[in-house]
Image: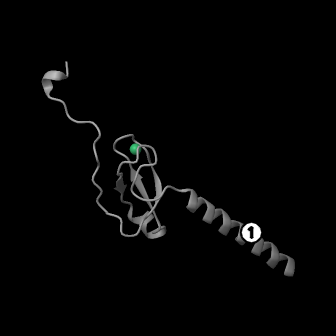
Amino acid sequence: MLVVVVLLATVLLRLAIVTAVVYLLLPQGPRCPHCSLDMVAIRNRFFDLLVPLLERRWCMECGWNGVVRRVRGARTRSRVQRTTTLRPRSTLR
Ligand SMILES: [Zn+2]
């Protein structure tokens, strides 16, 4: 019985270590890891209830999407900063 408890404890400890490392490897905050612009939050009620420390975000500039660590106090509605400016129609051709 003691062997089972020790093996179960090592498995749980391994799971805790892997979870902590994966959490620390995720990008943090509303900034895109590629172009460092603000990303748009993708709301999923089930995901928010299941893992409140993480959130899905999508970068409208480069198209990156993924799970990031939620930053406390971060804006829920992020504005996307545009690097490209709109040109007048006469210069498009
Ligand atoms: Zn981006």
Q: Return the residue found at the far bottom.
A: 1
Quick one: 84 or 45, which is closer to the camera?
84
Q: Classify residue 14 by image quadrant.
A: bottom right
Q: Position of residue 79 (x, y in %)?
A: 27, 53
In the shown orientation, is residue 2 left or right of residue 89? right
Q: Position of residue 23 (x, y in %)?
A: 56, 62
Residue drawn at x 43%, y 70% is: 49
**Could you tell me which secondary element the residue under label 1 belongs to?**
helix
The residue at which mark 1 appears reads as 11
Residue drawn at x 30%, y 56% is: 78
Q: Is mark 1 within 8 Å of ligand 1?
A: no
Residue drawn at x 38%, y 49% is: 58
Relative to 50, residue 60 above or below: above
What colour scheme does the image use?
Answer: one colour
Q: Return the residue found at the far top.
A: 93
Considering the image in quadrants, where does the C terminus appear? top left
Q: Position of residue 39 (x, y in %)?
A: 36, 51
Residue kind at label 1, given as amino acid type: Val
Residue drawn at x 31%, y 63% is: 76
Q: Quadrant of ligand 1?
A: top left
In the shown orientation, is residue 21 left or right of residue 29? right
Q: Position of residue 13 (x, y in %)?
A: 71, 71
Relative to 20, residue 30 above or below: above
